[in-house]
Image (spheres, rainbow, N blue to C red):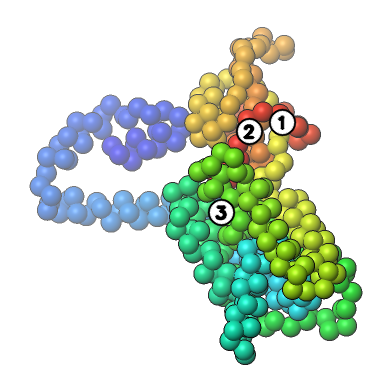
């Protein structure tokens, strides 16, 4: 019965077949150690794994982890081969890690490049204090990203990728694009390379006067203040340029900051609770009629981020394969529109 009920739930019908209920009662009356009961359990487990491996969710998650891996390696390689050898600072937790390393090198001469290890030490407490504020998938992908980032920054040597490249502006452009693209891929896949994103969300949930942007700004001011007083002013100027290019590339790569207005025309009213309970967005709907067929429809209007659009489209088409979508990405939202990425 359990398998039939689950199968019916996927099709939108939560009622189990009537003939399976008495059979289930007779089955549950058997002893726990009966052979038939024990022989069915491995078969159920095998079928469950086959269903998972054949399903689209498994391959979607696998592709997400591939993006997180590639983005983390790209970010680490850009930092070690372009940013650090050029003396630039990133206005995020990686910049804080570099500052800590430079202070340690003043106390312990000859210490090696430990930026990745220090960054891991900074991220672990953030994950521990904020694990209740983020969902499980995001947390697992973020842990995976931080692990790959730490290993990559430890294995990739810190040296100038192109020794003849002495123009800091070129380094800012190339490094900002590559590092921002790598970090954006992690965000696009539903994870994060850690740092200011997690800290910002956690503090904003605890204190309404703070936001993610304000926390990131405070971290950037600390990094730039150190760069200004401990290095020539030109280093601070180029570090700001690099961080701006990096931030712009992150926003262009991942979909969280792009808002999309969606109008859905459907016959299935189950889409309404899917939007409000699963996607966790508000919606406005009204009854309409098709001009050609004179058939009753429900017209639903909502606004989601482009990141959420992927899950919205998939869920709506599962409920109604004939649903009609109208999407408009040129949207400016005024009012309460919280970020659901975490």
How many badges with numbers are in the image?
A: 3
Which label number is shown at residue 333?
A: 1
Give whichever of 342, 167 is nearer the camera.
Answer: 167
**Mark nearer the N terminus (2 vs 3):** 3
Going by the picture, which residue comes out furthest to the top? 294
Q: Is residue 227 above or below residue 267?
A: below
Residue at the spot x=57%, y=64% of the render?
A: 145
Q: What x and y, as percent, mark residue 305?
A: 66, 39
Q: Closer to the camera, 36 or 120?
A: 120
Which of the 4 image quarters holds residue 169?
bottom right
Measure the C-alpha gap from mark 2 to mark 1: 7 Å
Viewer-side residue, 329 vs 118: 118
The answer to whether residue 68 of the structure is visible from this angle is: no
Local crowd at mark 2 within 10 Å, few (<14), some, or many (≥20)?
A: few
Q: Which residue is drawn at the image coordinates 89% and 74% (left, top)?
A: 167
Q: Secondary structure at mark 2?
A: loop
Residue 182, quarter of the rendered image: bottom right
**In which quadrant of the rendered image does the N terminus lie?**
top left
Is residue 230 toward the left or the right of residue 57 in the image? Answer: right
The residue identified by callout 2 is 337
The percent coordinates of residue 81 (x first, y second) are: 74, 77
Question: In the rendered image, which quarter is residue 334 located in?
Answer: top right
Disc 2 to disc 1: CB gap under 8 Å: yes
Relative to residue 57, is residue 72 depicted above or below? below
Question: Which is more toward the observer, 50 or 317?
Answer: 317
Q: Nearer the viewer, mark 2 or mark 3?
A: 3
Q: Residue tagged by mark 3? A: 199
Q: Residue furthest bottom?
A: 110
Sort mark 1 into few (<14), some (14-19) or many (20+) by Cα contacts within 10 Å.
few
Frontmost of labels 3 and 1 is 3
**Residue 221 location, x and y as percent?**
71, 58
Q: Earlier in the sequence, mark 3 or mark 1?
A: 3
């Amino acid at each position: 019965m359990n398998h039939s009920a689950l199968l019916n739930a996927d099709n939108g019908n939560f009622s189990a077949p009537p003939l399976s209920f008495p059979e289930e009662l007779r089955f549950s009356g058997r002893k726990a150690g009966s052979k038939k009961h024990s022989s069915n359990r491995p078969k159920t487990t095998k079928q469950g794994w086959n269903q998972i491996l054949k399903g689209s969710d498994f391959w979607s998650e696998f592709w997400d982890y591939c993006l997180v891996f590639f983005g983390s390696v790209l970010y680490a390689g850009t930092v070690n081969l372009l940013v650090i050898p050029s003396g630039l600072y990133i206005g995020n937790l990686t910049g804080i890690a570099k500052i800590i390393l430079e202070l340690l090198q003043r106390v312990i001469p000859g210490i090696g490049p430990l930026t990745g290890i220090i960054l891991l030490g900074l991220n672990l407490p953030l994950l521990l204090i904020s694990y209740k504020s983020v969902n499980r998938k995001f947390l697992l992908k973020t842990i995976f990203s931080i692990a790959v980032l730490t290993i990559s920054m430890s294995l990739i040597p810190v040296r100038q990728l192109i020794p003849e490249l002495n123009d800091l502006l070129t380094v800012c452009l190339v490094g900002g694009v590559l590092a921002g693209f790598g970090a954006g891929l992690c965000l696009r896949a539903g994870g994060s390379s850690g740092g200011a994103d997690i800290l910002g969300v956690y503090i904003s949930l605890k204190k309404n006067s703070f936001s993610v942007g304000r926390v990131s700004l405070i971290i950037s001011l600390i990094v730039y203040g150190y760069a200004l007083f401990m290095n020539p002013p030109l280093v601070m100027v180029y570090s700001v340029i690099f961080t701006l290019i990096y931030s712009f590339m992150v926003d262009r790569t991942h979909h969280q900051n792009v808002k999309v207005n969606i109008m859905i025309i459907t016959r299935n009213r189950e889409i309404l609770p899917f939007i409000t309970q699963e996607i966790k967005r508000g919606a406005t709907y009204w009854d309409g009629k098709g001009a050609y067929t004179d058939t009753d429809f429900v017209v639903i209007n909502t606004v989601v981020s482009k990141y959420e659009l992927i899950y919205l489209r998939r869920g709506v088409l599962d409920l109604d394969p004939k649903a009609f979508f109208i999407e408009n990405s040129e949207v400016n939202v005024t009012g309460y529109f919280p970020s659901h990425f975490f």
